[in-house]
Amino acid sequence: MPPTDDDAQYEVEVDPDLFAGIDPEEAAGLVGCSEVEAAEEAAERGWVFRVGSRDGMFFPLTREYRPDRVTVSVDEDEVTSVEVG
């Protein structure tokens, strides 16, 4: 069977910064901040911020990977852990 237009291969250019995401070491800098300070810092950096747990209570979260998002755990108004994605 001869090739058709459907068989054509296409090259796509992707911006390398599109999926660069947040450096986990940089995100770890939020640990020790208050929840408000961490949210403000994330906003200044253009990151999406959400709280995954607060004082032992876990919140329902979506599981899709977002390279621009941090999810924090907060205990007694202090960020104790950060996950990127």
Image: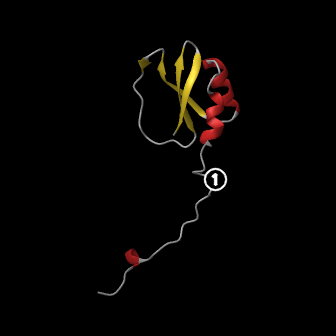
Query: Is residue 58 or residue 16 the one in the foreground?
Result: 58
Count every numbered label the image shows and give the total. Answer: 1
Quarter occupied by the N terminus:
bottom left
Q: Mark 1: which secondary structure?
A: loop
Q: Tell me residue 36's x, y (percent).
A: 64, 18
Q: Residue at x 59, y 40 (%)?
A: 24
Residue 45 sits in which quadrant?
A: top right
Residue 7 sits in which quadrant?
A: bottom left
Residue 32 sits in which quadrant?
A: top right
Query: Is residue 48 or residue 6 the one in the foreground?
Result: 48
Q: Residue at x 68, y 28 (%)?
A: 41
Q: Residue at x 53, y 19 (%)?
A: 74
Residue on which the image places disc 1:
17
Q: Residues within 10 Å of mark 1 (few under 14, many from 20)?
A: few
Determine whether, in the image, residue 1 is placed left or right of residue 12: left
Determine whether, in the image, residue 56 is placed left or right of residue 26: left
Q: Tell me residue 15's x, y (percent).
A: 62, 58
Q: Residue furthest top?
A: 76
Q: Tell me residue 52's x, y (percent).
A: 47, 25
| Residue 18 position (above or below residue 3) | above
| Residue 18 position (above or below residue 69) | below
Q: Residue at x 33, y 87 (%)?
A: 2
Determine whether, in the image, residue 55 is placed left or right of residue 17: left
Q: Tell me residue 80's x, y (percent).
A: 56, 23
